[in-house]
């Protein structure tokens, strides 16, 4: 068995300041619990703030301190995202969030068993490189260690950060023996130097008082005396770490639906701040989708606003935003750009304090193969994404495709409807039949004015821009649309030449109309 | 004396037409192909077409090239319903056309519109607005009757308000750039206003390098005096019925002094075309006689020319009613 342990030394601070905005980047930050400093980041430590200080002392040392409250649930959510990423590498992942009974705070983290997956990933170094690459978007500081036992790996990860390749791949310090030590023996040798503060946090002071600093010292003492003094749990932990007792873990199972909440560090007044916070939620969503080997069909981002203070105020408490890409996607840049364009158009009704992301719709299917040379299929997918982005920014109805309707009236024969990115390149039903009769008609103009422009008349000839038009081609009579509420279209169409030489398509109402005007209209241009 | 060194394809002498490594598609007009560098419309660079007003035959000029891009209407119909087979025909995207396209006319020109997309980036029809104002190109003339012979302001062609607005919609340039950079579109036709900053055009030119097909920008003829980064600029003017006069303002090659006159695919039937040409000749004759011939003479000449055209349809009651 080969175990990998992931230790996040600054988990609480990173989970809290994930949404820190750029203006507050240099300020020190601390996490407080009951007015005492529990965690302090590097900037605060540089100013002299130490865990255990009172809040007033910390503020005196650093007046521009950012204060947050320690929240185990927030840390657990952040750690769960890391566990979901790990689930993409191994099916046996144990998730130990802060607050798990029997787990020391320093041993909180994720442990995964990877021996069965080593061959698929091509060796331990390759697996570790891919794991670190997958964890990079989450923005956590991660220390890895590998060992034949899980607790041993966790202890090594918490103790040193140079043991990722495991004790069995370390060059032994001692002169070269005839045979390299077995992995378990190498681990036991390493663990002998472990400081006891990691293994037994509460009893560390008592042990130090007795002059016991390393695990080797503890092992020299009689076991029953130790058990009586410090409890059987300590002995069991030592045995499990050394591989002499079995370990039992409950494997993490993926929830069928994704729901994650993120509290923003500062109130978000603009859409850009909401987007920055939403990016982290997107990363978590993709980690979960990746662990399920599926792609996302749609998700909903909900912005929770400040609570209403007046009972009669009708500003909403939350604003949902549904993002549904035309094709299921697992690409964070594409989803981020879609979200950015939609957020850019959405007016925020009130400042947002919290964001949450929900996803229930997944598509469990193999991802489309990547291609070395662009083929028509991949081009169409790229075109669908382009149309989606344009629609997200300009509006759904601003990107249009042609639908031909079988109607003799020119203004109704062509309709432009919103394009559907999932069905690009497919003719609308009925278009081909409607266009089949086009060759029976007279010459049609390429430009059609959306509304026919009335023309003045002089000496029974229509005027365009003040000059008379010359009618070149005789009338083409149209009578249709008697069912329409605004009356039938009874027109005679002519092709006329304007003074500039361009050809125009004009018509004249055959029936007398009540409105003032000559009855001549300009309907199209022969472009 | 000096040997004629073989030049790198990207370099050309000022007296030659540079073809370089451009991919081109034939324009369908032999006279034009002979004058264009590379022998056709270039791919991957901007081509600017300047018009006095829309609707003088610019789309009929481009129709052969657009039809050839995708194999024409026949290829499109054979693509079937969805699937991989229909992927061979590239998409044609139009940005902010001045009016609506007619499906029948496109079918008559031989263009398959299954893969055509229109992007409207005008502010009035944008975000959340209900029916926006009419496209600004076709503002009805405010005073057509009172001043029939409106003399245009000097230097400003009549109809200069036709291609308003003067400033581009904020998202039009963004959408153009995204489309050009993606490289998934077959051809791009965009209608841009007159007031365009030079660096905006340069950005579009850089973005167009990723484009696999031709890029056509339509602007008002007022823009001919403005600098532009497009390597090919043409000024189009109507020349008679179904005729187009092209002046190559800028190209990778020597200046062409004479305008090209192209005959577009005809709209009218042959006898109607003959009648129109007869009228055109009569009008030119009148102009040669000078303005002293007077308005009355012009009217009588117009009246004489009209029956000549109408006699082609003698049994037309509507034509007789108009006389």
Image: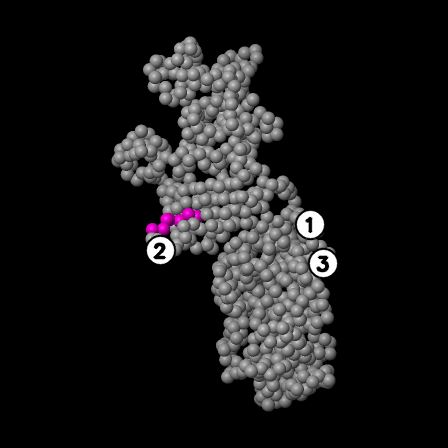
Along the horizontal axis of the image, is B167 left or right of A429?
left
Q: Are marks 3 and 2 in contact (CB under 8 Å)?
A: no
Which residue is pictured at 70% across the width and 51% down the height?
B85
Residue nearest the observer in this picture, B42 or A415: A415
User: What element does badge 3 sit on?
Assistant: helix
Along the horizontal axis of the image, is A284 left or right of B240?
left
**Residue beneath label 2, please?**
A312
- Whole-percent x, y for residue A405 in the image: 65, 65
Which residue is pictured at 41% across the width and 14% down the height?
A227
Q: Which residues are magenta?
A: A303-309
Mark nearest the camera among 3 and 2 is 2
Residue B77: mark = 3
Q: Quadrant of residue B35?
A: bottom right
Residue nearest the observer in this picture, A282 or A250: A250
The answer to whether residue B14 of the structure is visible from this angle is no
**Residue beneath label 1, please?**
B84
């Amino acid at each position: 068995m080969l175990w990998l342990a992931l230790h996040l030394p600054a988990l609480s601070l990173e989970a809290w300041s994930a949404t820190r905005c750029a203006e507050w980047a240099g300020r020190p930050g601390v996490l407080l619990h009951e007015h005492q400093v529990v965690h302090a980041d590097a900037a605060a430590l540089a100013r002299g703030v130490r865990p255990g200080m009172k809040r007033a002392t910390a503020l005196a040392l650093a007046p521009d301190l950012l204060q947050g409250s320690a929240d185990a649930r927030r840390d657990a959510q952040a750690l769960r995202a890391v566990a979901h990423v790990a689930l993409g590498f191994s099916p046996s992942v144990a998730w130990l969030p802060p607050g798990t009974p029997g787990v020391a705070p320093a041993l909180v983290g994720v442990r995964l068993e990877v021996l069965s997956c080593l061959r698929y990933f091509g060796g331990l170094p390759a697996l570790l490189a891919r794991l670190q690459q997958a964890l990079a978007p989450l923005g956590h500081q991660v220390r890895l260690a590998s060992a034949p036992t899980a607790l041993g790996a966790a202890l090594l990860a918490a103790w040193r950060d140079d043991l990722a390749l495991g004790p069995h791949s370390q060059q032994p310090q001692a002169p070269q023996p005839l045979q390299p030590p077995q992995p378990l023996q190498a681990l036991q040798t390493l663990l002998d130097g472990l400081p006891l503060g990691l293994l037994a946090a509460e009893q560390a002071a008592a042990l130090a008082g007795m002059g016991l600093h390393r695990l080797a010292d503890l092992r020299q003492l009689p076991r029953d005396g130790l058990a009586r003094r410090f409890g059987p749990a300590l002995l069991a932990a030592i045995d499990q770490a050394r591989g002499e007792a079995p370990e039992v873990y409950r494997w993490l199972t993926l929830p069928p639906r994704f729901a994650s909440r993120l509290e923003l560090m500062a109130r978000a007044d603009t859409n850009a701040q909401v987007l920055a916070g939403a990016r982290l939620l997107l990363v978590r969503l993709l980690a979960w989708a990746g662990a399920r080997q599926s792609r996302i069909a749609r998700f909903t981002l909900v912005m929770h606003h400040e609570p209403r203070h007046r009972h009669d105020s009708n500003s909403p408490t939350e604003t949902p935003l549904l993002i549904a890409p035309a094709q299921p996607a697992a690409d964070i840049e594409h989803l981020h750009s879609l979200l950015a364009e939609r957020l850019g158009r959405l007016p925020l009704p009130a400042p947002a304090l919290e964001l949450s992301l929900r996803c229930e719709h997944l598509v469990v299917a193999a991802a489309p193969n990547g291609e070395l040379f662009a083929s028509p299929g991949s081009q169409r997918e790229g075109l669908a994404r382009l149309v989606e982005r344009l629609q997200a920014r300009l509006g759904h109805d601003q990107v249009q495709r042609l639908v031909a309707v079988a109607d003799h009236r020119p203004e109704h024969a062509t309709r432009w409807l919103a394009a559907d990115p999932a069905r690009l390149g497919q003719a609308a039903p009925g278009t081909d039949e409607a266009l089949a009769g086009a060759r029976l008609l007279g010459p049609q103009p390429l430009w059609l004015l959306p509304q026919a422009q009335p023309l003045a008349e002089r000496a029974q000839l229509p005027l365009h821009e003040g000059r008379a038009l010359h009618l070149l081609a005789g009338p083409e009579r149209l009578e249709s649309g008697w069912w329409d509420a605004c009356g039938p279209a009874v027109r005679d169409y002519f092709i006329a030449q304007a003074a500039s030489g361009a050809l125009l398509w004009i018509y004249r109402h055959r029936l007398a109309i009540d409105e003032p005007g000559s009855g001549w209209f300009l309907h199209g241009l022969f472009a | 004396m000096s040997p004629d060194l073989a030049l790198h394809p990207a370099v050309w002498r000022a007296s030659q037409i540079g073809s370089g490594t451009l991919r081109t598609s034939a324009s369908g007009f032999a006279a034009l192909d002979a004058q264009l560098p590379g022998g056709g419309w270039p791919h991957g660079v901007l081509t600017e077409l300047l018009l006095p007003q829309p609707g003088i035959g610019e789309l009929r000029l481009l129709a052969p090239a657009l039809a050839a891009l995708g194999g024409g209407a026949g290829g499109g119909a054979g693509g079937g319903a969805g699937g991989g087979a229909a992927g061979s025909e590239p998409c044609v995207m139009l940005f902010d056309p001045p009016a609506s396209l007619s499906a029948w006319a496109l079918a008559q020109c031989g263009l398959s519109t299954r893969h055509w997309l229109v992007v409207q980036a005008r502010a009035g029809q944008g975000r959340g607005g209900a029916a926006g104002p009419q496209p600004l190109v076709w503002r009805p003339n405010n005073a057509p009757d009172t001043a029939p012979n409106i003399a245009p302001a000097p230097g400003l062609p009549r109809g200069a308000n036709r291609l308003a607005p003067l400033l581009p919609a904020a998202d039009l340039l963004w959408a153009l750039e995204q489309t050009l950079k993606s490289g998934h579109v077959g051809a791009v036709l965009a209608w841009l206003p007159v007031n365009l900053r030079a660096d905006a055009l340069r950005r579009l030119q850089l973005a167009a390098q990723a484009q696999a097909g031709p890029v056509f920008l339509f602007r008002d003829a007022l823009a001919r005096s403005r600098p532009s980064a497009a390597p090919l600029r043409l000024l189009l003017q109507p020349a008679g019925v179904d005729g187009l006069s092209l002046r190559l303002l800028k190209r990778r090659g020597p200046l062409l002094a004479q305008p090209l006159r192209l005959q577009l695919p005809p709209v009218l039937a042959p006898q109607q075309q003959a009648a129109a040409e007869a009228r055109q000749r009569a009008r030119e004759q009148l102009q040669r006689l000078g303005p002293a011939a007077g308005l009355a003479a012009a009217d009588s000449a117009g009246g004489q020319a009209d029956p000549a055209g109408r006699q082609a349809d003698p049994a037309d009651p509507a034509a007789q009613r108009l006389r």
